[in-house]
């Protein structure tokens, strides 16, 4: 993972941070979740969807682009925002009921080899669910997820383009690696 590449990508694509239809797709999976970690939180669009749905969730966002977190803090100053690259960030012994991520990949900064460690770390930090929307590298995402208990693995066409929605669950013993 190359953080400088990710920062450069979002400098070049300043308008492309997120869209409302995508974060809303993960909301149905977050019922009864107490705490949520949002990986690649951007400026807080997933939390906006959580708030819109009135879910009483204790939210933490992490993002490696300082400008995105500055915007997120301006929008939602009372929430916890972590500045850092997800794979490198040390969460110590912290866990979250659910770990979510909405379209984290970028053509600069990310490589296919990052996908497995990314899925593995989200799964490790979650006590109940991992829910994420991938906007690329579908076969690799599916391969990385196949070691876990997959509740949903759907490709869907949204007004803003195609995505793969994945939900991994830990609610019953998973046959795969943990
Ligand atoms: C396309 S934006 C989506 C933002 C938000 N999830 C949304 O749906 O509005 C992807 C975000 O993920 C962040 N990101 C990408 N890779 C990351 C990584 N490895 N660690 C932390 N943040 C990352 C980017 O900085 C960017 O803010």
Image (spheres, grey):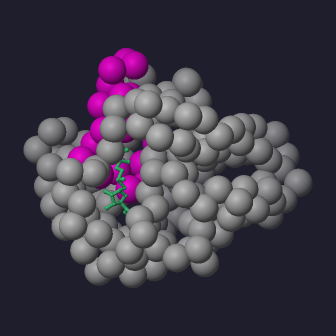
* In magenta stretch: residue 53: yes
Residue bounds of the magenta highlight? 36-54
Where residue 136 appears, as percent x and y from the top left, is: 55, 57
Q: In which quarter of the image is ligand 1?
A: bottom left
From the viewer's perspective, tell me whether residue 24 is left or right of residue 74: right
Residue found 34% across the figure and 32% down from its top: 20
Res 30 visible: no
Which sits in the foreground, 110 or 161? 161
Count of labels shown?
A: 0
Residue 124, located in which quarter of the rendered image? bottom right
From the viewer's perspective, tell me whether residue 32 is left or right of residue 170: left
Where residue 7 appears, as percent x and y from the top left, is: 26, 71
Q: In which quarter of the image is the C terminus?
A: bottom right
* In magenta stretch: residue 80: no
From the viewer's perspective, tell me whether residue 8 is left or right of residue 155: left
- Toward the left, the furthest residue is 74
- In the rendered image of this protein, does residue 128 appear above or below residue 42? above
Where residue 160 appears, as percent x and y from the top left, is: 41, 37
Residue found 84% across the figure and 46% down from its top: 173
Where residue 18 appears, as percent x and y from the top left, is: 32, 44
Residue 91, located in which quarter of the rendered image? bottom left
Residue found 60% across the figure and 61% down from its top: 137
From the viewer's perspective, tell me whether residue 165 is left or right of residue 144: left
Which sits in the foreground, 70 or 91? 70
Res 86 visible: yes
- In the rendered image of this protein, does residue 54 appear above or below residue 95? above
Residue found 77% across the figure and 44% down from its top: 150
Q: In which quarter of the image is the N terminus?
A: bottom left
- In the rendered image of this protein, does residue 9 appear above or below residue 15? below
Which sits in the foreground, 17 or 168? 17
């Amino acid at each position: 993972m190359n953080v400088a590449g990710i920062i450069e990508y979002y400098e070049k694509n300043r308008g492309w941070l997120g869209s409302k239809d995508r974060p809303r797709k993960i909301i149905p999976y977050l019922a009864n979740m107490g705490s949520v970690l949002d990986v690649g939180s951007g400026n807080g669009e997933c939390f906006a969807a959580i708030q819109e749905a009135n879910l009483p969730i204790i939210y933490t966002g992490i993002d490696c682009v300082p400008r995105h977190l500055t915007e997120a803090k301006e929008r939602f100053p009372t929430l916890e925002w972590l500045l850092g690259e997800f794979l490198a960030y040390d969460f110590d012994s912290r866990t979250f009921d659910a770990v979510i991520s909405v379209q984290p990949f970028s053509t600069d900064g990310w490589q296919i080899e990052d996908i497995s460690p990314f899925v593995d770390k989200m799964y490790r930090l979650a006590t109940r669910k991992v829910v994420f929307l991938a906007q690329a590298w579908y076969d690799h995402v599916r391969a990385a997820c196949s070691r876990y208990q997959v509740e949903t693995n759907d490709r869907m066409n949204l007004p803003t383009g195609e995505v793969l929605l994945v939900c991994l669950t830990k609610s019953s013993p998973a046959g795969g690696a943990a």
